[in-house]
C-alpha cells in the first residue's frame, strides 16, 4: 500500500511540475512603448547608415531619420516611427520590431 501512495504522489508531483512549466512558457511579453520603438528604430538607422554607406539614398535616409527623431522627441511617436521605418526602407533594410 505504501508503494501505491508513493507512486500516486510521484505522479501528482510530475503533473504539477509539467503544468507549472507550461504556465511559465505562456508568460506574456510586455510590448515596447512607442518611445522605446523610436529609440530602437533610430539605432537601426544608425547601423544601416554605417553598413550601407554607399547607398544612393543615404542623404534622404538621414533627413528622414532627423525628422523621425524630431517627431519622437515632440511626443508624436507614431509619425516618428513611420519616418524611421521609411529611412530604413530607403537603405534597403527591413525594420526589426522585436514585439509584434
Image (cartoon, rainbow, N blue to C red):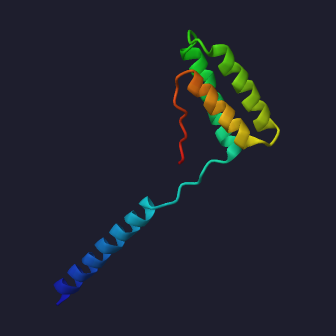
Q: Quadrant of residue 17?
A: bottom left
Compared with residue 36, is residue 52 higher up or lower down, i.e. above or below?
above
- Residue drawn at x 72%, y 21% as measured from the top left: 63
Report whether 4 appears left or right of 81: left
Percent across and percent down for residue 77 are 73, 41
Residue 86 on image: x %, y %: 62, 30
Horizontal side of 78 relative to 52 (left or right) equals: right
Q: Does 49 appear above or below 72?
A: above
Taking 3 as reference, is 81 above or below it? above
* Residue 42 occupies quadrant: top right
Residue at (63, 22) in percent of width and height? 46
Q: Residue furthest right?
A: 74
Q: Position of residue 97 (x, y in %)?
A: 55, 40
Q: Residue extending furthest top?
A: 54
> Residue farthest to the bottom?
1
Q: Residue at x 56, y 9 (%)?
A: 54
Q: Is residue 39 above or below residue 31?
A: above
Q: Nearer the viewer, residue 42 or 26?
A: 42
Report whether 27 appears left or right of 14.
right
Q: Position of residue 18 (x, y in %)?
A: 33, 67
Between residue 20 and residue 74, name the one nearer to us.
Answer: 74
Amino acid at each position: 500500500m505504501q508503494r501505491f501512495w508513493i507512486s500516486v504522489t510521484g505522479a501528482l508531483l510530475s503533473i504539477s511540475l509539467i503544468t507549472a512549466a507550461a504556465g511559465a512558457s505562456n508568460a506574456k511579453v510586455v510590448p515596447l512603448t512607442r518611445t522605446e520603438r523610436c529609440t530602437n528604430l533610430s539605432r537601426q538607422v544608425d547601423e544601416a547608415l554605417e553598413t550601407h554607406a554607399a547607398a544612393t539614398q543615404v542623404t534622404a535616409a538621414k533627413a528622414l531619420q532627423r525628422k523621425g527623431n524630431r517627431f519622437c522627441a515632440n511626443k508624436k511617436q507614431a509619425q516618428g516611427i513611420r519616418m524611421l521605418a521609411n529611412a530604413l526602407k530607403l537603405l534597403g533594410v527591413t525594420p526589426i520590431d522585436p514585439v509584434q
